[in-house]
Image (cartoon, helix red, strand yellow):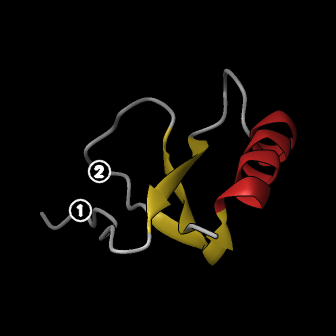
């Protein structure tokens, strides 16, 4: 099975938002369901968070002024 990470990114594409890994090495099959459920429950028009699937070697963006 392919493994991936679930990452929280900026819903508004803000450069000052630090991305965070929410779950590591999740099988892709399950990650699709998890991301959909998290976006339905914790994301929305006014939420700053949006959840996506990224490869396990993805390095989250960290804002450094």
Residue at point 42%, 60% (across, down)? 19
Residue 43 in picture, x, y percent from top left: 72, 37
Residue 61 in picture, x, y percent from top left: 28, 62
Residue highlighted by disc 1: 63
Identity of the residue furthest to the front in this view: 1
Residue at point 36%, 33% (across, down)? 13
Residue 64 in picture, x, y percent from top left: 16, 67
Residue at point 78%, 39% (across, down)? 36
User: Do the CB atoms of the residues marked 2 and 1 lie less than 8 Å apart?
Assistant: yes
Residue at point 57%, 40% (across, down)? 48
Q: In the displayed structure, would residue 42 be above or below residue 65?
A: above
The label number, if any, that marks residue 41 in the structure image: none
Q: Tag 1 or tag 2, which sits nearer the N-term?
A: 2
Q: In the displayed structure, would residue 6 be above or below residue 51?
A: below
Q: Nearer the viewer, residue 51 or 25?
A: 25
Residue highlighted by disc 2: 16
Residue 11 in picture, x, y percent from top left: 51, 34
Q: Quadrant of residue 44?
A: top right
Q: How far is mark 2 from mark 1, CA to CA?
A: 5 Å
Could you tell me which secondary element the residue under label 2 belongs to? loop
Could you tell me which secondary element the residue under label 1 belongs to? loop
């Amino acid at each position: 099975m392919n493994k991936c990470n679930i990452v929280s990114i900026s819903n508004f594409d803000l450069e000052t938002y630090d991305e965070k890994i929410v779950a590591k090495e999740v099988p892709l099959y399950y990650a699709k369901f998890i991301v959909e459920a998290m976006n339905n429950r914790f994301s929305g028009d006014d939420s700053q968070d949006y959840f996506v699937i990224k490869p396990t070697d993805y390095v989250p963006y960290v804002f450094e002024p």
